[in-house]
Image (cartoon, rainbow, N blue to C red):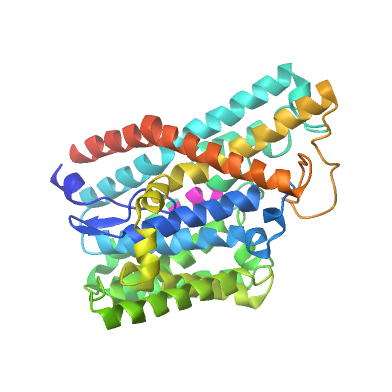
């Protein structure tokens, strides 16, 4: 139990970035919350001004920030603490116990909706019968076991953003065994693993856009990059509070944020998408020091609270987004509301809902985000936290 009190561990989109007692990465945690909101906006299908922003249309790229940050913090916490089978087992219990409960609850909710659609066909869109397509029963087991990003299904299914949780499970396993077998030489083996993941992705048609097929390799690439950063900067924690250093730190933070935004504008399929993990490594390194004005802003209460809810935001948003589409379908059929736009040939998350123009869509998008955050708060209280406490109790018994 002493370990559970002194160390809080973090994964992509998970609670506070804390490595040891007194060492808390609040700015990075807040950035994870911002990245989660970018993914929410990317998946939002409401006609609005926000939907047209190029940065929003590239919001899925921020998933790689989760992988890099996860590798950085997990390596800080565990790189010297996985020397036995018992420690490996405890690591696995804590990691799975942290991510699986909410994933399982959301999967159950998705299945429940398909059951409703079976009895109320009007709840779904045309050509979308219950338990069909990505919601086929054949995909339930892989999702339940969190292996849907291992290339077994060939496509995203059910709560589609959960592919990254599956991929990160693979990254956890690779990291744990590298540290267990490599000892102090783990950075060397981790660098080789990064090179292998990069080679695999570079020779794949989807590249850094891969999800269900080679999502595990994508997660391992980002995770390894973050872990190597942790190994190279151990002990380099906070910037000095000197006024001159504050100005320099602020300039570094602005430069890092600008770099991330520029990399996010790179279109899919471009070779520069492979630079995204490197850009996120730079951002993690700069903001981990918490020395500038942007870090001070990120450490304010609203941003810190958002960081604490980021895993819930990431996991619940697709369910809420799809239920909004269901409600619009019912409204169109019952009242001829005209909210659902005709299906087109555009991008996967092109606008499908029109609530009366772009300005009305902006308000609807803000309302959707607020609802997602409230749902994430409930998920944290009633699912995440109890699941985490249970995992800690189980790990303590080892």
Magenta segment, principal secondary structure? helix
Q: Residue at x 42, y 36 (%)?
A: 377
- Can residue 201 be seen? yes
Q: Residue 363, position in %: x, y?
A: 65, 43
Q: Residue at x 42, y 75 (%)?
A: 282
Residue at the limit of the structure toward the left, as seen here: 2
Task: Relative to 205, say whether 385 is above or below.
Answer: above
Q: Nearer the viewer, residue 110 or 338?
A: 338
Q: Quadrant of the N terminus?
A: top left
164 falls in the magenta region: yes
Q: Residue 84, position in %: x, y?
A: 20, 55
Total labels drawn: 0
312 falls in the magenta region: no
Q: Residue at x 71, y 55 (%)?
A: 49
Magenta stretch? 163-168
Task: Relative to 174, say whether 377 is above or below.
Answer: above
Q: Residue 336, position in %: x, y?
A: 85, 27
Examine the image and state in which quarter residue 268 appears.
Answer: bottom right
Q: Residue 356, position in %: x, y?
A: 79, 41
Q: Nearer the viewer, residue 28 or 231?
A: 28
- Can residue 198 be seen? no
Q: Is residue 258 left or right of residue 337?
A: left
Q: Quadrant of the C terminus?
A: top left
């Amino acid at each position: 139990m002493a370990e559970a009190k002194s160390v809080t561990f973090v994964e992509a989109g998970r609670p506070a970035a804390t490595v040891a007692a007194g060492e808390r990465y609040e700015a990075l945690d807040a950035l994870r919350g911002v990245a989660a909101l970018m993914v929410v906006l990317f998946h939002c299908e409401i006609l609005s001004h926000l939907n047209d922003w190029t940065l929003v249309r590239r919001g899925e790229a921020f998933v790689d920030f989760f992988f890099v940050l996860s590798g950085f913090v997990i390596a800080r916490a565990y790189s010297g603490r996985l020397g036995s089978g018992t420690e490996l087992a405890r690591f696995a219990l804590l990691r799975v116990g942290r991510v699986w409960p909410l994933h399982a609850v959301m999967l159950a909710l998705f299945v429940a909706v398909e059951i409703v659609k079976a009895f109320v066909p009007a709840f779904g869109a045309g050509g979308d019968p219950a338990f069909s397509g990505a919601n086929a029963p054949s995909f339930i087991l892989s999702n339940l076991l969190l292996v849907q990003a291992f290339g077994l299904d060939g496509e995203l299914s059910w709560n589609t953003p959960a592919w990254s949780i599956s991929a990160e499970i693979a990254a956890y396993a690779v990291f744990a065994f590298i540290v267990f077998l490599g000892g102090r030489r783990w950075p060397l083996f981790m660098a080789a693993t990064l090179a292998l993941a990069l080679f695999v992705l570079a020779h794949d048609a989807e590249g850094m856009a891969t999800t269900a097929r080679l999502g595990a390799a994508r997660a391992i690439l980002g995770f390894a990059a973050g872990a190597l950063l942790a190994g190279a900067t151990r002990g380099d924690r906070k910037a000095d509070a000197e006024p001159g250093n504050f100005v320099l730190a602020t300039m570094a933070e602005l430069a890092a944020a600008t770099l991330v935004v520029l990399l996010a504008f790179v279109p899919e399929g471009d070779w520069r998408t492979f630079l995204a993990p490197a850009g996120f490594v730079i951002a993690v390194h700069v903001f981990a020091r918490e020395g500038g004005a942007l870090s001070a802003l990120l450490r304010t209460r609203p941003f810190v609270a958002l960081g604490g809810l980021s895993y819930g935001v990431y996991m619940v948003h697709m369910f809420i987004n799809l239920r909004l589409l269901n409600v619009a379908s019912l409204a169109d059929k019952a009242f001829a509301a005209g909210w659902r736009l005709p299906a087109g040939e555009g991008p996967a998350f092109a606008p499908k809902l029109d609530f009366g123009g772009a300005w009305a869509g902006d308000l609807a998008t803000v309302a959707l985000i607020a609802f997602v955050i409230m749902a994430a708060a409930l998920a944290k209280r009633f699912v995440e936290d109890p699941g985490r406490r249970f995992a800690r109790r189980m790990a303590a018994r080892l």
